Image (cartoon, rainbow, N blue to C red):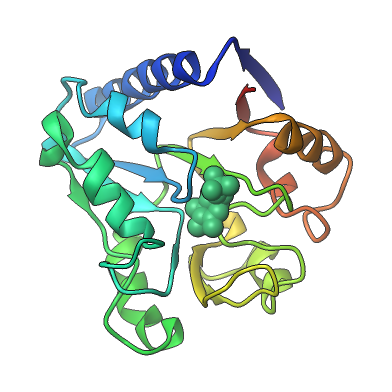
Amino acid sequence: MILTEYPDRDMLALDLSDRLASELGSALRHKERVTFAVPGGTSPGPIFDALTAVRLDWDRVDVVLTDERWVPESAERSNTRLVRERLLQGHAAAATLLPLVADTPTPEEALEGLSEGLLPHLPIDVLVLGMGADMHTASLFPGADRLEAALAADAPALMAMRAPGAPEPRITLTAPVLRGAISIHVVITGAEKRAALERAAGMTPAEAPVATVLDEAVVHWAE
Ligand SMILES: O=C1O[C@H](COP(=O)(O)O)[C@@H](O)[C@H](O)[C@H]1O
């Protein structure tokens, strides 16, 4: 794991968005289409804002969420809504969002169709992950019902997940898809998450799911 510390959250957002833009640009020079995976939650908004001002061949970028909460797109907690409102704006409005949610009562009912849409876009070129203070990443939560299967090397790309710490059902990219990304960044802020990250580095993915990517990841932290 490489840990990069920033003086504050604004610097983190600006520096990381520069780096992501450079990695996306470099991938776009070698491939016709590029897959950019991003987290939901509270952390990525300022990074998304900075990316909207970047000139890039966004019309050749496919954006996918690392995970989604099974709520309507209109809900406050919808990660899809966050991406539409904060990332797919400005120059980045030309990117294509691959759906990770559908109008079915449960994620299980939509898995097959969503997986079919996702698989042609793997591996991920540039991956940004968040992490909760409980050391979950994407929707790989400690104690989740299907965590062991989602961490397995032969896991399907996409799985439904339910967890005691998650108020609604989830859908998530699984460990082999996350680990298979060409470039992996984890974004965390605050002292509590920094302490959790340091604990996670000495734990197994079953105990601390974020550990599944830490060997290959650059972690970006600001107070
Ligand atoms: O529920 C989720 O949580 C994680 C961490 O979110 P944060 O609000 O603590 O930054 C996020 O990465 C994930 O995409 C989201 O669904």
Total label count?
0
Pick whichever, 191 or 197, lies toward us. 191
Q: Quadrant of the N terminus?
A: top right
The residue at the point 20 percent across, 22 percent down is 53
Q: Place residue 148 in its image quadrant.
A: bottom right
The residue most toward the right is: 202
The residue at the point 56 percent across, 33 percent down is 187
Image position, residue 109 (x, y; %)? 39, 89
Image position, residue 151 (x, y; %)? 68, 63
Image position, residue 141 (x, y; %)? 68, 63
Left or right of 47 in this view: 135:
right
Left or right of 22 in this view: 223:
right
The residue at the point 68 percent across, 68 percent down is 165
Vertical position of residue 68 compared to residue 137: above or below: below
The residue at the point 10 percent across, 40 percent down is 94
Image position, residue 137 (x, y; %)? 61, 51
Q: Place residue 193 in its image quadrant.
A: top right
Vertical position of residue 74 compared to residue 188: above or below: below
